[in-house]
Amino acid sequence: MALAFDEFGRPFLILKEQEQKSRLRGIDAQKANISAGKAVSRILRTSLGPKGMDKMLQSPDGDVTVTNDGATILEQMDVDNQIAKLMVELSRSQDYEIGDGTTGVVVMAGSLLEQAEKLLERGIHPIRVAEGYEVASRIAVEHLERISQKFEFGPENIEPLVQTCMTTLSSKIVNRCKRDLAEIAVKAVLAVADLERRDVHLDLIKVEGKVGGKLEDTELVYGIVVDKDMSHPQMPKRIEDAKIAILTCPFEPPKPKTKHKVDIDTVEKFQTIRLQEQKYFDDMVQKCKDAGATLVICQWGFDDEANHLLMNRNLPAVRWVGGVELELIAIATGGRIVPRFQELTPEKLGKAGLVREKSFGTTKDRMLYIEQCANSRAVTIFIRGGNKMMIEETKRSIHDALCVARNLIRNNSIVYGGGSAEISCSIAVEAAADRHPGVEQYAIRGFADALDAIPMALAENSGLQPIETLSAVKSQQIKENNPFCGIDCNDAGTNDMREQDVFETLIGKQQQILLATQVVKMILKIDDVICPSDF
């Protein structure tokens, strides 16, 4: 370990408790880091593309997750190594920013690390490799701009958006009804999108799931679906032209905040208290009636007495509705959330054309649909499926599709999928390497080779001969000067991705390349790893 000597030749310690720390330095540290990064990307490599495999993860509590989504796989894996944690964060940032392409970005970073390892073995300094990668990533991003195409769509012509969402969903479990789900996702995004500002507020789209039924029963509700039912079984199950009072105050007599006790020594006193309570409830219900409400939605519960009174006064009510759902109901119906009964006025009520209770299957599961709202800017995607895992996975897939539709509304440039964009960038970067004198050109060539990893993984997962397929497509691209040739994963008989309608968003692809390069540069610059040893 690090020992230093003073002028009398006596050794003194620099690191405290150094015998308890393990330390890797120089090329060993880089190699250990690179192999950790490669190990993570090797796990995800098999789940890339439409024929990619799924991973099954069991959490410490015994919950089982089956998923194909890169970010979810890495979140659930309990990763211990510091470099592997960087890879987890890499896919998470791709998930936050773009929502799609979380597997590809890790595979890309892994193959960049693999190429870097070869260059380091030749004795090239890691900083030069990192600089070469930086130059190459800029070339690749500019090249993507050049081969991208603008996509025109409008509220009437949603086909382009649906096609792009179908590409995203084709690599998930739900690909047998990807057409329906893609249409649902696009309609949901367009319902809440602000096309002038090119902005989409995804929080207004609520994704709700219920076990039972089949995947094809998934529907888009222009309104809100709440997993609650009416508080009293005899209340009406269907209310038309509802005026909704949205309350966050409990339906019960006020309790003093301090500790208190009430001494009752005669029957009369008890009667008085009971009448007082009853009057209190009466006033509450009357205030709701006076404001003109025909439905009360309350965040808290209410006593049986209040429930009974509401029933008698013909005022249907729903209790225990969560805060987020209340906000969405308020946005959808144009109502205001009222914190005190005294503040309830007719203009604070929300309006909905139809509120109905719907029951599912043979169980007593009921849900409340609030439809035909005053402001249709809040929608619900209601997912059905055979089991809980299926519904969770469908939710993740729908989330990816929603993000892709949002990205297309923000920036309507697309590149073609199936690895065609990567192969095209690889050719462009390879050609640019000759223009750079010095050691960097090795790194730029390494970057070009690393870009081939994604089409290679696609071919491998589809059961094709990886190297043969890749070189055939690459030579076809160079010969025909056609950047739209990719790997034919679905055996459609053509390599042209325009005919197969396989699209990806341009910003998603650019983000993948930039994020992967940044993480790899960061890993390459680490040359000393000091960590507490295990024993």
Image: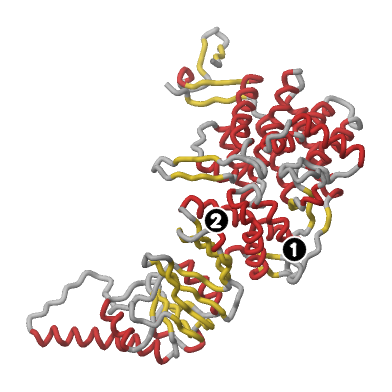
Asked if residue 271 lies left or right of residue 389, the reply is left
Residue 152 x/y as whole percent: 81, 63
User: Residue drawn at (52%, 83%), measured in percent from left and top?
Assistant: 351
Residue 160: name its quadrant. bottom right
Say what secondary structure mark 1 lies in: helix
Query: Relative to 112, is 304 above or below?
Result: below
Residue 373 position within the rendered picture, expressed as x and y whole percent measured from the top left: 56, 79
Discs 2, 1 touching: Cβ within 8 Å: no
Q: Of the residues shown, which amino acid type is indicated by label 2?
A: Lys
Residue drawn 54% across the image and 8% down it:
8
Closer mark to the observer between disc 2 and disc 1 = 1
Name the amino acid, label 1: Glu
Horizontal side of residue 5 vs 520, given as left or right:
left
Q: Measured along the vertical axis of the image, is residue 119 above or below residue 195?
A: above
Residue 294: image location, x then y, percent: 43, 86
Q: Which residue is mark 1?
A: 159
| Residue located beneath label 2 in the image | 395
Front residue of 34/238: it is 238
Quadrant of the image containing the C terminus = top left
Q: Is residue 97 among what the camera can see?
A: no
- Label 1, residues with CA under 10 Å away: few <14, some 14-19, many ≥20: some
| Position of the N terminus by quadrant | top right
Q: Report the Cα–Cα distance between label 2 and label 1.
A: 22 Å
Does any portion of residue 238 appear in the rendered image? yes
Q: Which mark is residue 481?
A: none
Give the total number of marks visible in the rendering: 2
